[in-house]
Amino acid sequence: MVELQILGGGKMGEALLGGLLAAGWCTPGAVRVVEASQLRRDELTAQFPGVEITALPGAATSTILAVKPGEIVAVAAATNKAGGGRLLSIAAGVRIAELEAVLSPGTVVIRAMPNTPALVGQGVSAIAPGAAATEEDLAWAAEVLGAVGVVERVSEAQLDAVTAVSGSGPAYVFLIAEAMIEAGVLAGLPRPLSETLAIQTLVGASALLAVGEHSPAELRAMVTSPGGTTAAGVRELERGGVRSAILDAVMAARDRSEELGA
C-alpha cells in the first residue's frame, strides 16, 4: 500500500506530484500515479524516477481524484473497491454526495477547487469536507494542496462562488493581458515589447496586492494622478463597464457551476 495515490496524470496531477516531492512531503516510493495513457505514463516515468506509474488503481492511504468530471464518479467507485482510502476530489461541479453515494459507508471525501496557477506553485485552493471528514482529514488536504499554493477552508455551498472567482479567475486575467498587449501594439509598440510590458505589469501589480498593505482601491488611487494619463484611462474603463462586466462574469460562472452540479 502506498501513502498517496494520484488518479490522473494530467497537468494538475503532475503539478501536485511535483510540488509534494519538492516540498519533501513524501518520497517517490510512497506515491502512485494512475494514468490511462501509455504515452503520458512514459513521460511521467521519465520525469519522476522512483514513483510508481501505472494504469490501474490500488490500495492507498489516500487518493487524489484528478480526472475529468465526467469520469470521476466511476473512477471513485473503482478506487474505493481497490482500497484507495480517503478521497480528495479536485473535479469541478461534482458534488460530495455524488461521490459518497458510490463509496463504502464512512469513506472520507474532501472536495477541492484549485486553479491553474498551481502549475507554477502559485495556486489558490478551497476545500470542503464530506460527512465523514475530520479535522485531521482537512489538515491533510490543506497540507497536500498547500504544496502548490494557498489553501482556504469553505463549505461546499460556497464552492460554486469559489469556482467563479478563483477557479475561472485566471481566464479573466489572461483576457485582460491579451487586451493590454493588443492595445500596446495598436499604440505603436512592437509586439514582444508590448507583451513584456503587459505581463510584467500584471505580475508587479499582483505582488503589490499580495503584500496586503493597501486595498486595491488605495493602490489604484496611488497611481492615478488628478487629470493625468491614468485617470483618463480608468475613466474609459469605467465608461466601458469593465467593473460591471467582471461582476456579471463571476455571477454567470457561479450560475453555470451550480447548473453543472445540479
Image: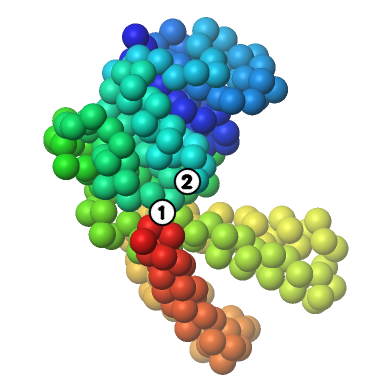
Which residue is more in the foreground, 36 or 210? 36
State how far apart marks 1 and 2 are (Cα). 7 Å
From where the camera sits, is residue 117 visible? no
Which residue is more in the foreground, 243 or 127? 127
Dot 2: element: helix
Position in image of residue 85 (x %, y %):
28, 23
Position in image of residue 50 (x %, y %):
52, 7
From where the camera sits, is residue 37 visible? yes
Instruction: Identify the amino acid type marked 1.
Output: Gly
- Residue at 35% in and 44% down: 112
Instruction: Identify the amino acid type marked 2.
Output: Pro
Dot 1: element: loop
- Residue at 41% in and 70% down: 255
Q: Earlier in the sequence, mark 1 or mark 2?
A: 2
Position in image of residue 52 (x %, y %):
50, 11
In the shown orientation, is residue 101 left or right of residue 244?
left
The residue at which mark 2 appears reads as: 69
Which residue is more in the foreground, 182 or 259? 259
Q: Residues within 10 Å of mark 2 (few under 14, many from 20)?
A: some
Looking at the rendering, which quadrant does residue 202 occupy?
Answer: bottom right
The residue at which mark 1 appears reads as: 93
How is the structure coloured here? Answer: rainbow
In the shown orientation, is residue 182 left or right of residue 82?
right
Looking at the rendering, which quadrant does residue 76 occupy?
Answer: top left
* Discs 1, 2 touching: Cβ within 8 Å: yes
